[in-house]
Image: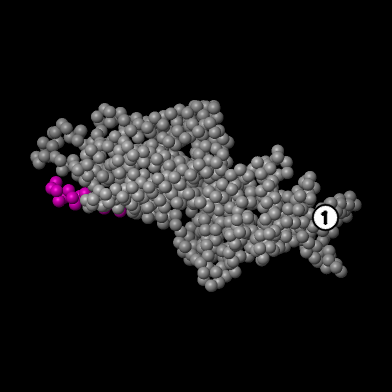
C-alpha cells in the first residue's frame, strides 16, 4: 500500500470514528433534552426571594428521612416535569423561570395558578391520543387544565394496564400509567390545603338557620361535642342528623386530600419515628386518638391564617415564619434537623453543574493546546493553554470532591451507597489519578483525558439524576446500613471500577493517537501510555479481587453464603478474570502493544456491565438502582466496539504498510507475522 492510499484509508477511518461518536452523542442529547414549549400563564406572579427562603428549610419526612421542603419540591418537579425549572411567560410575554420551591408553593397555596403551569411532560404522543386529546408533538408539556377533561379515561386505562406484568407492557401502556401517577400526585399537592381554603359548610349553623362556613380548626375544637352527639344518637337508636352527616363527610374528604404527600408534623414523642400529615392529624383529633388535640388545632389554625392571606405576600410571609420556626425547633429537639441547611445549600450551589462547566472548558482549552502543538506553535503558548486546562481540571475535581463531602455529611454515612454516588466518586477518582499521572509523567495526554473523562462522567451523573427522578440521598436498603462494609467493600470495588475505566481511557487514547499516525514521531510517548495503562490494569485486578473477597465476607455475614452467583458478583468475577487474561497474555508474549490496548479498551465494557448493566436485569440481591431506560448503556457499548474496530483497521493499515514488497506467498510463510499482528 503506497503512502497516498494509506493516508486516504486513515482519513476515512478517522471520519467514520468521528461520525460515530457525533451520532451517539447527538442521540444521547436528543434523548435527554426535550423540546422547550414556552406557555403563557397570565395570572402568574413570582414569589419573592424572602418568602421562598422562609419555606425552603421547612423540615418534612419523605422517603424514610427528614429533608428540606426545597428537596421534596425539586424531586417532585423532576418526576412530573423532567427538569429543575419551568419556563413560562406572563401576560406581557415576559419570560419567567419557576424553580422547584416556587412551583410547589404554587401547587399548595395557589392551585388555580398551578393548574395553568405546563407541569406534565409526556414523551409519547400516543398516550395523549389514547385518552382522547389532540397530540401536537413529541415531548410537549401539558397543563393540568389541558389534561383535566381526559382524567377519567386516563385513570380507567391506567387501571387496566396495571394488571399487565411490568416487563410485558409496551411504551403506550407504561406511559399511560406514569402520566396517571403524575396527575394523582399533582392532585394531592393542589388539594393538600383545601381544608384551609374551603372550610366546612355548617348547614343550619348560621343565623336564622342559614348555612355558614366554619374553619376546620373550629370543627376540630368542637370534636368532644360532636362525638357526644353521635354517641347519644346511637344509644337511642336515632339516625344522625343529615346536617351533621354532611359536615362529617366534608371533614373526611378534606382530611383525605391532606393525608398524603407532605408529612410535615413532627411527633410529640421522641420514641415515635413517623411524622404525620395534616390530614392524619385532623382525623386523629376527630377520632379522639390524639392525646394533645390542642396542639393539632393550633397547627391547623396557623395554616388557615397563613393561607387566608396568600394574596398579600408580606402578610402571608409573616404568618408563615412562626409555623416554619416551630417545626424547625421541634425537629432540632428530635435531633432530626441534621444536614437540612447543608442540603438546601448543596442543591443551590449546583456543584456537579459547575464541575461540568469547568471540565467542558478544560476540554476546549486542551483541544486548542493540541491543535497549536500540531501547528508547531511555540512551546510557551501551548504551555499556557495546558496550564489553563490543568486549572480547569483541578476546579472541576474540587467541585466534585466538595459535592461528595457534603453528601456524606448530609447523609451521615460513607460516600457511596447508590448508583449516583458511584458515578461522582468514580469521576473524582479518575480525574485525581490522571492528574497525579500528569504530575509525574508530564505527558499532557493524561490531563486531556482527565477533563474528557470528568465531563463524560458528570454528564452521566446529571442524566441519571434527571432520568431516574429520585432522591439519591434517601436511606439505604437494610443490608447496606453498615458503615464498616460501605467503607471497605463498596469503596474498594468502586475504586476498582474507576481503575478499570481509567485503563480503558488510556488505551483509547493510545489507539486514537497511534491510529492518527503518531507512532513514528512519538514512540517513547506511546510507550509511556502503555506503562501507565499496564499499571492501572494491575491496580484494577488488585482492587477488584480484594473488593470481591470483602463482598463475599459481607454476603456470608448478611445472607449466610459467601457466593451465590448473583449478577453483581458474576460481574466482579468477570473483571478479575478478564484482567488476569490480559496480564497473562501480555506476560506470555501472546499480545503486544496493539493487542494489549485493544483488550484493555474492552475492559470498559466488562466494568460497565458489572457496575451499571446488572441493574437492568431485574434479578439478584444487588439491584439497588433500577433505571428507566437501557439505550445509554448500549450506545456506550457500540461506541467502545466502534473504537476497537477503528483500532483494528489502523493496526491493519500500519501492518501492511510495514511489510516488505514481496508476493503474498512469501508474506504468509513469514513466521513472525503472528507476533506482528498484535
Relative to 432, residue 42 above or below: below
Mark 1, other Cα within 10 Å: few <14 / some 14–19 / many ≥20? few
Residue 67 placed where, x, y %? 60, 47
Q: In the visual, does 203 lie left or right of 34?
A: right
Viewer-side residue, 554 vs 265? 265
The residue that appears at 61% across and 65% down in the rendered structure is: 113
Residue at the front extreme of this rendering = 380
Report the residue marked by disc 1: 222
Viewer-side residue, 580 vs 148? 580
Residue 409 placed where, x, y %? 55, 41
Q: In the visual, does 420 lie left or right of 344?
A: left
Residue 338 placed where, x, y %? 61, 43
Viewer-side residue, 291 vs 652? 291
Residue at the left extreme of this rendering = 662
The residue that appears at 79% across and 59% down in the rendered structure is: 247
Relative to 678, residue 96 above or below: below
Residues in magenta, as a range: 1-19
Q: In the visual, does 284 lie left or right of 469?
A: right
Question: In which quadrant is the C terminus drawn?
Answer: top left
Q: Mostly what secondary structure, the magenta segment?
A: helix
Amino acid at each position: 500500500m503506497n503512502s497516498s492510499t494509506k493516508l486516504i484509508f486513515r482519513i476515512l477511518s478517522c471520519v467514520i470514528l468521528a461520525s460515530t461518536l457525533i451520532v451517539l452523542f447527538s442521540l444521547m442529547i436528543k434523548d435527554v433534552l426535550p423540546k422547550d414549549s414556552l406557555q403563557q400563564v397570565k395570572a402568574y406572579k413570582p414569589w419573592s426571594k424572602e418568602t421562598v427562603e422562609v419555606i425552603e428549610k421547612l423540615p418534612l419526612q419523605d422517603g424514610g428521612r427528614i429533608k428540606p421542603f426545597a428537596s421534596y419540591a425539586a424531586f417532585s418537579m423532576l418526576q412530573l416535569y423532567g427538569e429543575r425549572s419551568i419556563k413560562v411567560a406572563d401576560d406581557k410575554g415576559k419570560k419567567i423561570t419557576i424553580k422547584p420551591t416556587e412551583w410547589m408553593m404554587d401547587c399548595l397555596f395557589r392551585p388555580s395558578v398551578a393548574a395553568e403551569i405546563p407541569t406534565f411532560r409526556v414523551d409519547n404522543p400516543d398516550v395523549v391520543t389514547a385518552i382522547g386529546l389532540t397530540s401536537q408533538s413529541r415531548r410537549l408539556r401539558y397543563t393540568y387544565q389541558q389534561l383535566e377533561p381526559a382524567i377519567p379515561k386516563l385513570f380507567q386505562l391506567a387501571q387496566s394496564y396495571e394488571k399487565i406484568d411490568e416487563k410485558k407492557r409496551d411504551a403506550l401502556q407504561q406511559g399511560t400509567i406514569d402520566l396517571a401517577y403524575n396527575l394523582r400526585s399533582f392532585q394531592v399537592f393542589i388539594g393538600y390545603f383545601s381544608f384551609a381554603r374551603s372550610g366546612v359548610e355548617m348547614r343550619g349553623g348560621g343565623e336564622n338557620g342559614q348555612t355558614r362556613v366554619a374553619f376546620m380548626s373550629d370543627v376540630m375544637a368542637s370534636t368532644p361535642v360532636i362525638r357526644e352527639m353521635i354517641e347519644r344518637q346511637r344509644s337511642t337508636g336515632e339516625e344522625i342528623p343529615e346536617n351533621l352527616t354532611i359536615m362529617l363527610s366534608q371533614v373526611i374528604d378534606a382530611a383525605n386530600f391532606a393525608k398524603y404527600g407532605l408529612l410535615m408534623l413532627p411527633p410529640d414523642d421522641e420514641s415515635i419515628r413517623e411524622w404525620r400529615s395534616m390530614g392524619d392529624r385532623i382525623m386523629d383529633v376527630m377520632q379522639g386518638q390524639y392525646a394533645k388535640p390542642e396542639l393539632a388545632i393550633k397547627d391547623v389554625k396557623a395554616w388557615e391564617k397563613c393561607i387566608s392571606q396568600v394574596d398579600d405576600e408580606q402578610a402571608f410571609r409573616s404568618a408563615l415564619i412562626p409555623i416554619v420556626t416551630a417545626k424547625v425547633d421541634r425537629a432540632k429537639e428530635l435531633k432530626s434537623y441534621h444536614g437540612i441547611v447543608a442540603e438546601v445549600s448543596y442543591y443551590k450551589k449546583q456543584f456537579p453543574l459547575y464541575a461540568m462547566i469547568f471540565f467542558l472548558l478544560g476540554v476546549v482549552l486542551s483541544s486548542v493546546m493540541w491543535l497549536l502543538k500540531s501547528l508547531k506553535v511555540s512551546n510557551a503558548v501551548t504551555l499556557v493553554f495546558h496550564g489553563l486546562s490543568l486549572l480547569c481540571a483541578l476546579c472541576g475535581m474540587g467541585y466534585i470532591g466538595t459535592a461528595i463531602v457534603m453528601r456524606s455529611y448530609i447523609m451521615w454515612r460513607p460516600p457511596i451507597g447508590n448508583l449516583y454516588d458511584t458515578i461522582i466518586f468514580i469521576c473524582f477518582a479518575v480525574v485525581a489519578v490522571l492528574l497525579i499521572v500528569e504530575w509525574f509523567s508530564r505527558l499532557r495526554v493524561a490531563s486531556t483525558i482527565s477533563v474528557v473523562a470528568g465531563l463524560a462522567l458528570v454528564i452521566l451523573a446529571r442524566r441519571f439524576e434527571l432520568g431516574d427522578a429520585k432522591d439519591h440521598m434517601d436511606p439505604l436498603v437494610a443490608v447496606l446500613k453498615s458503615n464498616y462494609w460501605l467503607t471497605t467493600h463498596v469503596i474498594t470495588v468502586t475504586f476498582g471500577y474507576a481503575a478499570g475505566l481509567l485503563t480503558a481511557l488510556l488505551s483509547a487514547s493510545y489507539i486514537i493517537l497511534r491510529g492518527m499516525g503518531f507512532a513514528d514521531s512519538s514512540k517513547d510517548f506511546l510507550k509511556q501510555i502503555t506503562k501507565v495503562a499496564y499499571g492501572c490494569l494491575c491496580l484494577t485486578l488488585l482492587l477488584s479481587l480484594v473488593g470481591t473477597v470483602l463482598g463475599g465476607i459481607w454476603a456470608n455475614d448478611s445472607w449466610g453464603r459467601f457466593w451465590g452467583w448473583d449478577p453483581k458478583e458474576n460481574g466482579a468475577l468477570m473483571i478479575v478474570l478478564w484482567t488476569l487474561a490480559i496480564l497473562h497474555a501480555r506476560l506470555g508474549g501472546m499480545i503486544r502493544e496493539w493487542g494489549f490496548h485493544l483488550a484493555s479498551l474492552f475492559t470498559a465494557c466488562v466494568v460497565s456491565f458489572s457496575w451499571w448493566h446488572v441493574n437492568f436485569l431485574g434479578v439478584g440481591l444487588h439491584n439497588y438502582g433500577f433505571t428507566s431506560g437501557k439505550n445509554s448503556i448500549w450506545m456506550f457499548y457500540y461506541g467502545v466496539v466502534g473504537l476497537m474496530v477503528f483500532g483494528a483497521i489502523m493496526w491493519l493499515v500500519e501492518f501492511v504498510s510495514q511489510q516488505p514488497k514481496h508476493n503474498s506467498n512469501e508474506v504468509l510463510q513469514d513466521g513472525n507475522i503472528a507476533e506482528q499482528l498484535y
